[in-house]
Amino acid sequence: MFSNSKARKGSNRAAKERKLQGFLNLCAILAEDQDFLILLTECTDPAPLNTHVFMRALEVTDHGLKLSKTNAFTKVKTLLGSYSCNKLPAPIQVLHQSFRVHTSNTKKSRLRAEFRKNRTAKRIGFHPTASLLINSIKPIYLSKLSTPHPTPKAYVYERILGPKPKAPKVTDTSCGKCDTFLPLTESKLQCTIPSTDSAIIRDQNTKQIIAVVIRDFAKDYYDYIKPWAVELINDSINRRTLSQRNGPGKLARVGVTDGPRNARVFGWSRSIKQKFRKDRCSDHDIHERNISALFGLFYSLLRAQAPPEIIQDLEKAMTTAGLPRLDFDRRMQFPLPFMSNNPMTFYGYPLSPPEGYIARNFAKQIHVDKHWINCPWGVYWNLKRETPTGDNTMRCGANFFISDYGLRIANSENVCVIWNIALWHGTSWYYDGLEHVGIAFVLSPSTENAWKDYKARVERGEIEDGFTVIQEEIDEH
């Protein structure tokens, strides 16, 4: 029995020595591989290094490592680093030193990339320091009116002089419509937020937020973001069946939808026209990723600049329900496609609620919306506001109203507005060839109910789950 035990120990020792020698042979091959050493000095991306080491490892019969094309370099580098350099054969000492230099270069590269990302996030406005501005704004307190103004269930027009606007043509009898127009009475307004001012508006009695206005929403990079975003929105609107079909302008839904009115079902982008669907359009995936990127940037800007209680409501509603984000690849990341010469992708950022809207030349009568329980917030970002004459002031219309408080918010380019969608609100009629383009998101009861029904069907085994969120480490931004 003892002799068998000694034999096994001897056999194990011999096997370890063979594996060690095999590993050293692999290291010797790599130490003499000039292409690998050059790659090691020039490349901090582990992918090509892993592939190269894996291919060279095939030349060694017994190196004692389980290697693949995704981990070969990493494993060899880690194991070699566990040995003292001066105890290794001379050629392998060179490789040991080269690995140490590579580690140093990789750390420097990551620090440079992180610095560049932080600098970019600050300049665009979604770095955590961006919250300092909104925290410095003194709130405006308003009392709720006994009679809302502008009048609910009617389009509001601000130019009293001149002809009354004509009702939009009804093109779809299954979609809501409004043919009532009522003029604005300036004296009935309590407050107008000028196009130059940011603001936080609260109820006089409850102190609860009514609306938040954030000007200069995307900071230094807005001139780059605007042309990319506006072109993307216009293209995307042309690809989709419209949500508003009897009003001025165009409104379409992006991200997930809850299906047609007569057959609610939770799914991705059911509003896309047939000729633009995935099996028919070669750039479908690229387009949808760009839409996700735009909304990812939108939500990151919002998280950095909005009052914390609003973000807490949004995050609590989504995380409690396990709701997926507006994230086409479900990777919790967004690139900045407008920086084509200097690509950059931000990882680990919580992304936008999945119910997104894109709009061009949109106006809406004074109305109220139902919302997800305990989360009444709608948010829009106005990206373009122009007329042929260059005038984009308040007199051109398309301003935002919250009638319960007699509040007018003058719209402008690059403004973000957050408001309680359960209040009477709407966008006024517009004039002088005004073109305005923007995006928005809400969390509606129809999405909530469709999501609950979807999860129940998954649990019953009726359908496969295509919306499980990929959990990745999320940075605190």
Image (cartoon, grey):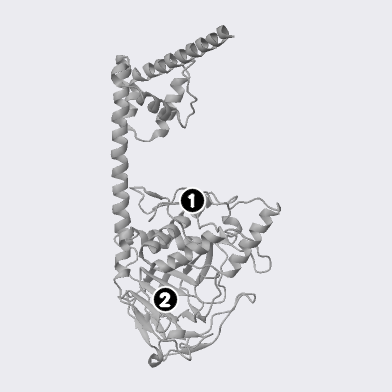
Q: Nearer the viewer, residue 453 or 374?
A: 374
Q: Nearer the viewer, residue 200 or 264?
A: 200
Mark count: 2
What residue is at 35 percent from the left and 73 percent from the top?
412
Q: Indicate left or right for 255 with 82 as reference.
A: right
Q: Secondary structure at mark 1?
A: helix
What residue is at 54 percent from the left and 65 percent from the top?
253
Q: Amino acid at mark 2?
A: Ile
In primary-sequence order, the first of circles 2 and 1 is 2
Q: Quadrant of residue 217?
A: bottom left
Measured from the top left, where is residue 298 in percent x and y? 41, 61
Give the crowd class for mark 1: few <14, some 14-19, many >=20 residues within 10 Å.
few
Q: Amino acid at mark 1?
A: Ile
**Image mark for residue 209:** 2
In this rendering, the answer to whether 184 lies above or below 87 is below
In this rendering, the answer to whether 309 lies above or below 81 is below
Q: Nearer the viewer, mark 2 or mark 1?
A: 2
Task: From the image, tell me which residue sits under label 1.
Answer: 286
Q: Secondary structure at mark 2?
A: strand
Give the crowd class for mark 2: few <14, some 14-19, many >=20 residues within 10 Å.
many
